Image: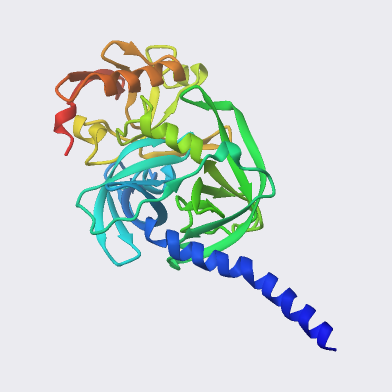
Amino acid sequence: MKKFLLVALAATFVLQIPAQDLADLFDEVKNSVVTIYTAETVNTGAGDPRTFTSSMGLGSGVLIRNDMVLTAAHVVGNAEEIMVQLFDGQAVPAKTVRISKTADVAVIQLLKPLKNPQLATMGVSDDTRIGEEVFVIGAPMGLTYSLSRGVISGRHSEENKTFEGEILEFFQTDAAINTGNSGGPMFNYRGEVIGIVSSILSRSGGFEGIGFAATSEIAQTLLSSKGSKYFGIDAVLLPQELAVILNVPQRSGWLVQHVVKNSPAGVSGIQGGFRKVIIEEQEILLGGDIILSVDDIVVENMDSVLKIFNHLEEAGSTARHKITVFRGGERVDLYWVASDFL
C-alpha cells in the first residue's frame, strides 16, 4: 500500500509540473500582451454615399518595442481610432503605421510613452515543429488576458500569396481561438512569440478546433519591409472584364472600398464605395473612386500596385504625389503630401 501511495504521489507531482510551468510562463509574458479597442466608420452599402455606420472593435496584440505593437491587419485596417490597454491598466491611443492585409499582420504605434514597458521576445517560427505545445493569450469575447493552450497541428503555405518575396505561411493550432483573440500572440513554451493569431476555420461561427496564426517570420519581415506602409485604403484590383463593364479607360484599376478618414488616403480626398453588390460570390462596394495611376505609375496588375506602395514609401515626407482616379465617368487628379498625415 505504501509503495502504491508513493507511485500515486509521484504521478500527481509529474502531472502538475507542466501546469505550474504554464502558470509561471503566463506571469512572465502577460505584461507584453495588450488589448486593442477600435472604432471605425464604414458606408452601409445601401446606395447612399452619405450614409455611414459606426462600430466598435476588439482585438489583441503584443508589445515588441517601447512604442510598437504587433497585431492582425483585420483588427486595425479600417480603424478611425485605436486604443491600446496594458495588463496594468495603462491605456494609450495608437495609429497604424505598417500593414499587410495579405499576411494579416500590422504594426501600430503608441502615441504616448509607456511606464515600465515589458517587451515580448520574438521566437524563430521556422524552428517550430508540428506537435509542439503552444499557448495563446488574448481577449476572447472581451474576456481579457484569457489563456488557451494546444499544439501546432500543422503548417500551411499559401503558394499563390507572397509577402516581400516570401511565401506566406500560417500555423494551424487546436488552442481555443475566438472573437477578440485576433492579433494576439501565440507563445511557445520558452515564452517566445512564434505567431500572431489570425483566424479560425468554422462551420458554426465558433471555435471548432482549427485556428490559424501568421508565423513570426512573416511578422518580423513586415517590420523592415518596403511597401507595407499604411495608407488607410481598402481596395480591390479590377479584372479586365469588370474594368470594361465599369467603363474604366484602361485595362485595370484599383476600386476603392473603404477609406479611413484621418489617413493619407483620406487626407488626399479619395472616396470609398457605397453600393454593395455580389460579383462571382464576392461582396464588393461600387461607386467609389477607381485609382488609375499614382505619379505616372499605371495600375495594371498587383505588381504595379506594389510598385506604387514602394514608390510612396521611398519618396520621403515632403514629396507631392498626384493620384489620378476615375470618378463619375471622368478622370480626376488628387494630390497628397506625406507630411499632411496627422
Q: Residue reaching furthest front? A: 3
Displayed quadrant of residue 59: bottom left
Which residue is at 44% across, 31% downward?
221
Q: Is residue 291 visible?
A: no
Which residue is at 85% across, 89% downward?
1
Q: Residue reaching furthest right? A: 1
Q: Is residue 218 visible?
A: yes
Q: Position of residue 149 (x, y in %)?
A: 59, 60
Colour approach in the figure = rainbow
With respect to residue 306, does 140 lie above or below? below
Residue 237 left/right relative to 18? left
Quarter of the C terminus within the rendering? top left
Residue 118 left/right relative to 183? left
Q: How many marks?
A: 0
Q: Residue reaching furthest bottom? A: 1
Residue 192 left/right relative to 311? right
Looking at the picture, tell me which residue is in the foreground, 17 or 173: 17
Looking at the picture, tell me which residue is in the foreground, 19 or 215: 19
Q: Position of residue 263 (x, y in %)?
A: 24, 37
Residue 162 left/right relative to 262? right
Displayed quadrant of residue 161: top right
Displayed quadrant of residue 89: bottom left
Looking at the picture, tell me which residue is in the foreground, 4 or 232: 4
With respect to residue 314, does 212 lie above or below? below
Q: Position of residue 9 (x, y in %)?
A: 73, 80
Which residue is at 42% across, 66% downward?
144
Looking at the picture, tell me which residue is in the foreground, 105 or 216: 216
With respect to residue 264, does 82 lie above or below? below
Which residue is at 27% across, 47% downward?
67
Q: Position of residue 234 (x, y in %)?
A: 38, 35
